[in-house]
Every structure is written in C-alpha cells, then in structure tokens.
Amino acid sequence: MKVINLGATHSVVNGYMAQLRDVEVQQNRTLFRNNLKRIGHAMAYELSRTLTYSDKEVRTPLGVKVVPTYDDRIVVGTVLRAGLAFHEGFLDIFDGADSAFISAYRDEGSREEMQIHIDYLAAPSLEGCTFLLVDPMLATGGSLELSYEAFLRAGTPAKLHICSVIAAPEGIERLQRAFPSDEGTLWVAGIDDKLNEAAYIVPGLGDAGDLCFGPKLSADFYTKK
C-alpha cells in the first residue's frame, strides 16, 4: 500500500492540524468539525489528481468547450461517528459521489485484549467503483481493516483509497500487511509517534468523535440496562 503524507510538506493543512491538536482550540466543536472538513477538502483535491479522466464537450451560451473531467464512480465510505465531518469534506469536492456508512467500535482496554465490533452497514453497490474509506484516526488499523472487509459484501471496488487525518505507525504497518503491493493508497495529514497501552495515538488529539459531537457513555452502560 502506497502512503501519501500531506503533512510532510508545508501547506495550509498544517495550520488546520495545529488547531485540531490544540487543547484550547478544541473547546470549539464547530471549529473542530470544520477543520476536519477542510482537511477533507484538501485531501480530496490531491486525491482527484489520481483519477481517470477523459475529454467531454460542454455547451456554453456561446459555443462548445472540451473539458477533461474524471470518469470514476466514487463512493465515500465512513466509519461512524467520528468520520462524519471528515466525510462531508470529501462530498463537497466529489459532489456526485454516493455514500456508505458503517458502525465500528472497540472495547476499552489494553491493546492486547481489544475487540472490535461492527453492527451497522449501509452501502450502495461498490462493484467496480473508486472507494474512499475515510476515518480521521488510524490507530491500530483494526477498525478500518474490518470495516473494509464488511463493505466488500456490497461488491469489490476497482480502486481503494483509505483516508485518515492522523495515523500511528502501528496502524500503517497493519494496513500495509492487509493491502500488499499497490492494491490501495493510504492518505494521511500527519503521522504521529506511537500508540499508548490503551491504543490511543500519541501525541494525537484525543477522541475525535467526542470532540466533534460531545462525550459518549461507554458501551458497558447500555449492556447493563
């Protein structure tokens, strides 16, 4: 799997990343969501350079102009709930794309004992599409790998792009094992140092879902009712 790190070069994306990470700025949920959306815009633009294009005639009020536009049928798939704002950024750029959604969550605990659960899937046909699987945080890579396997029930994409804001080396290595050679491309806006014992990215930014939408009760709360 090819890895493209937008944070490795100087651009406005680094400014959005700085605000996402800042504990003071994080108190503004609207700005946090907007920064995820803006990183989605930038990443989608860079990704658009890799699509397949052909010339099409466009009729204007004064004549006809030939314009090269992309031919790919794009589907943007998102892991709920943290991926929603990031997802919206991709839809702003690929305004004709379809959407797919999956619910994947992990048990709290050590990295060695962690279990990942998937309990919701909604997707159009993915057969032959260009599939963008977007999720802000690539930690262990387990949720993304299992989510993609679940999405395959809807068909096999022709191209796969996995898009994250922040990635840990452990998650990148897992995805590279799961998708060898050039079977897919991983896009990130920053690569951090490591995972801690609870499998959170360090230095990271905290829980992206909570920072977008507010804190949630643990999964145990619901099962004890």
Image (cartoon, rainbow, N blue to C red):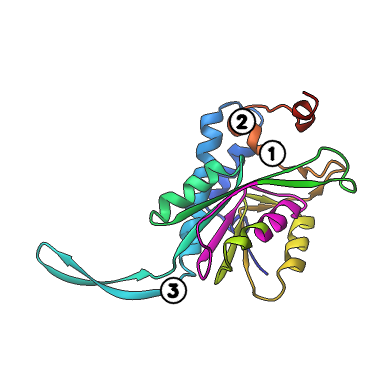
Can residue 219 be seen at all in this image of the molecule? Answer: yes
Give the residue furthest to the left: 62
- The residue at which mark 2 appears reads as 26
Q: Label 2 vs label 3: CA separation?
A: 38 Å
- Which residue is painted at 49% across and 61% down in the image? 46
Instruction: Determine whether label 1 and label 3 are within 8 Å by CB.
Output: no
Identify the amino acid type marked 3. Answer: Thr
- Which residue is painted at 78% across and 30% down in the image? 223
With 177 as the anchor, is 48 left or right in this view? left
- Magenta span: 120-149
Q: Locate residue 141, reporting x and y percent.
A: 74, 55
- Which residue is painted at 69% across and 76% down in the image? 181
Tell me which label, 2 or 3, sits earlier in the chain.
2
Looking at the figure, which quarter contains the N terminus?
A: bottom right
Number of the front mark, 1 or 3: 3
Nearer to me, 90 or 27: 90
Residue 214 position by quadrant: top right
- The residue at which mark 3 appears reads as 52
Nearer to me, 115 or 26: 115
Instruction: Determine whether label 2 and label 1 are within 8 Å by CB.
Output: yes
Q: Label 2 vs label 1: CA separation?
A: 9 Å
- The residue at which mark 1 appears reads as 205
Can residue 22 be seen at all in this image of the molecule? Answer: no
With 143 as the anchor, is 16 left or right in this view? left
Nearer to me, 86 or 220: 220
Instruction: Determine whether label 2 and label 3 are within 8 Å by CB.
Output: no
Tell me which label, 1 or 3, sits earlier in the chain.
3
